Amino acid sequence: MKNNFYLLLLIMVGIIIACFWLWPVNDDLAGWQADWQLTPKKAEPQQTVLLFGGDVMLARTVEEKMVKYNDWSAPFIDIADQMAQADISFINLESPIYDGGNTTPAGSVVFRALPESIAGLQTAGVDIVTLANNHFADQGTAGMNYTMEILAENNITYCGAGLTSEQSHQAAIMEKNGLKFAYLGYAYPNYNLASESSIGINPMDVGQMRDDVGKASSMADVVIVSMHAGAEYVYTPNSQQIDFAHQAIESGADLVIGHHPHVVQTYEQYQDGHIFYSLGNLIFDQEWSVPTTEGTVVKVVYQGKEITTIEFLPIKTTDYHRATWGNKETTQHVLDRLQIENLIIEI
């Protein structure tokens, strides 16, 4: 009898426990439980830093200085750290690199940079160059081929030229932080152009450019157009530069990077894009005037796919070969030519 009582008691306790666990949880208890659950936070978009520099010429007096100091990185040494910290650094390579040909004498405009000069690009962390300019063919077909080969051997991408016209207007895609950046290069000369079967540069054909930008937009998150055009030593863009840059933005480009005038020209925000008509000289030996010794590096900061800031970093060339960060005077000159008030633009 006593055993039956304990058995019955045990069964009743089991039923009560089962009811407690199976009974629907009331709203208050459910809320209390939800408060303790870990809700994953949405990750912030990564920051990506792009740097853009102007004309880089590694021949003539620049070469003489590198040989004199026995330092092939000398032109970049003062600015290399900051350039190398960027996710992607871009320049206009104004002189072909070649292991043949002749030294470029003072005053000559037929350039040849020695293969050793690639060390400067590496020191500065240059990731991509445009070859679409009026000097790419200065050493002929052999020089053009050699330039593209040595860049590829040193993991430096290029745009704006190719073994054929089709290659010359293909976008170079750089991928960083989960984003794809497409670079396209164009130059004003109507000579030394790539053809269906020959090496050369990509011309400023507006119709072709619009098609190229459209294709690049379908492959990349950001499209950057490099434009080698304008009147040399003139502080304002001409009609060709303005029309080409505007049509690039209208076609889907996000940034237009200009060079060739050898002086800084104006900045323009056009529709949803940004145009830098000329960044001036980065590495050059043109110390016969103050404006040709002054340029700017542009730092564009992306948060995810959106630009947050644009910063201008003024450059001063010294000793006919060496880029340094600009002083107060240089900074004011650069601001005046950009026609802006501050070095940093918040977007």
Image: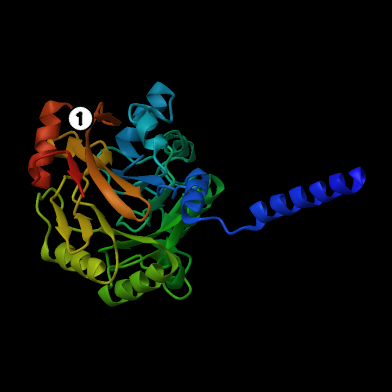
Instruction: Give x and y (percent) for residue 53.
Output: 30, 44
Instruction: Give x and y (percent) for residue 83.
Output: 37, 36
Q: Is 247 on the left or on the right of 234, as rendered?
A: right
Q: Nearer the viewer, residue 275 or 64?
A: 275
- Give the answer, above or below, for where 211 lies relative to 327: below
Q: Nearer the viewer, residue 166 or 34?
A: 34
Packing grade of label 1 (10 A; few <14, some 14-19, many >=20) is some
Residue linked to disc 1:
326
Instruction: Give x and y (percent) for residue 158.
Output: 43, 55
Q: Residue at x 70, y 49 (%)?
A: 17
Residue 54 shows in the view: no
Q: Can you name the residue that lies furthest to the front here?
A: 1
The part of the image, by quadrant, that contains residue 310 is top left
Q: Nearer the viewer, residue 107 or 90?
A: 90
The part of the image, by quadrant, that contains residue 159 is bottom left
Q: Is 271 on the left or on the right of 205, as rendered?
A: left
Q: Is 16 on the left or on the right of 256, as rendered?
A: right
- Give the answer, above or below, for where 305 lies relative to 124: below
Q: Residue at x 76, y 51 (%)?
A: 12
What amino acid type should be assigned to the residue bearing mark 1? Gly
Q: Residue at x 46, y 68 (%)?
A: 167
Query: Which coloring applies here?
Result: rainbow
Q: Nearer the viewer, residue 69 or 91?
A: 91
